[in-house]
Amino acid sequence: MKGLSAVSSRRKSGVPRLLWTLLGACLVATVIGYKPVVIVHGLFDSSGVFVELLRFINQSHPGTNVSVIDLFDHSSSLQPLWKQVEGFKEAIYPIMQNAADGVHFICYSQGGLICRGILSTLPNHNVHSFISLSSPQAGQYGDTDYLKYLFPQFMKSNLFHFCYTGVGQRISICNYWKDPHHTDMYVNGSDYLALLNSERPNPNSTVWKKNFLRIKKLVLIGGPDDGVITPWQSSQFGFYNDNETVVEIKDQDLYLRDVFGLKTLNARGDLFLCSMAGVEHVKWHSNDTVFNTCIKKWLV
């Protein structure tokens, strides 16, 4: 027995430290059992932009199964959001089925609205943490570089003429364009956000609310130096009134009436806001401080 013990010790001392580190990481992942993470990208993005985020997850939660859904990349991200919801749903559902303990969503920018569509319309999803990373959840209304690129002949003040038409609703950004000066046109013309927010009659609103409330945690991340999401508080369900004064989430009608579950989530203790200054829109998923402060603890 002493001989066997001695041989084992010599072999162990000869194994490179890196190998034992990896073996230890795998053991931790097996014991703790981190839930799989699903990542959905934003406008004009693709799966390739999340290299740093993947590294952060692998370092903090080794062995985590991370799926970055490679659909509707680049210019294809302009396709109507309901079409994208169906495509992403088809790709993500098998991941959910193979995750007995549930999955986490990290949904960036426009992807956050796509994920809301999935969570609202999928009755048996098992999403634990829904992390909305700088997403225009309450809508978008701003003269940003994206707007100038897509609609060079328009400004924020007149884009409603195009967005709230049948043709406009074929372009994703118009699905969540919310002009606070033309609310009636938005309610009647928006085929996506106005339905998700139950701002227009929706016969499925009760079922969608029930589906959405299957999530265990809602984490809303954004900040004042984003430069794209306008107002930036939209990332946390704040938005302009008709004077372009920001009304924060808890004073919004959709919260007060609990139209799709925000107030319920808050009463449960499952609604979390994480605000961070100094982060530009394209940097949220590659900023380690954002990850460590706002994301890391929800990926267990």
Image: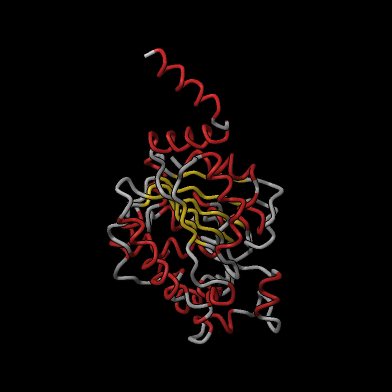
- What residue do we see at 55% from left, 80% from top? 163
Q: Is residue 263 left or right of residue 274?
A: left
Toward the front, the furthest residue is: 3
Residue 106 vertical placement versus 14 (above, below): below
Q: Quadrant of the N terminus?
A: top left
Q: Measured from the top left, where is residue 33 in percent x and y? A: 38, 39
- What residue do we see at 42% from left, 34% from top? 27
Q: Measured from the top left, where is residue 4 in percent x and y? A: 40, 19
Residue 45 vertical placement versus 269 (above, below): below
Q: Quadrant of the C terminus?
A: top left
Quarter of the image for residue 289 reads: top right
Count of numbered labels shown in the rendering:
0
- What residue do we see at 57% from left, 32% from top? 16
Q: Measured from the top left, where is residue 70 in percent x and y? A: 50, 66
Q: Give whichever of 269, 134 is nearer the camera.
A: 134
Toward the top, the furthest residue is: 2
Q: Measured from the top left, where is residue 235 in percent x and y? A: 56, 56
Q: Is residue 263 left or right of residue 49?
A: left
- What residue do we see at 44% from left, 49% from top? 65
Q: Is residue 198 left or right of residue 112?
A: left
Q: Give whichever of 109, 104 is nearer the camera.
A: 104
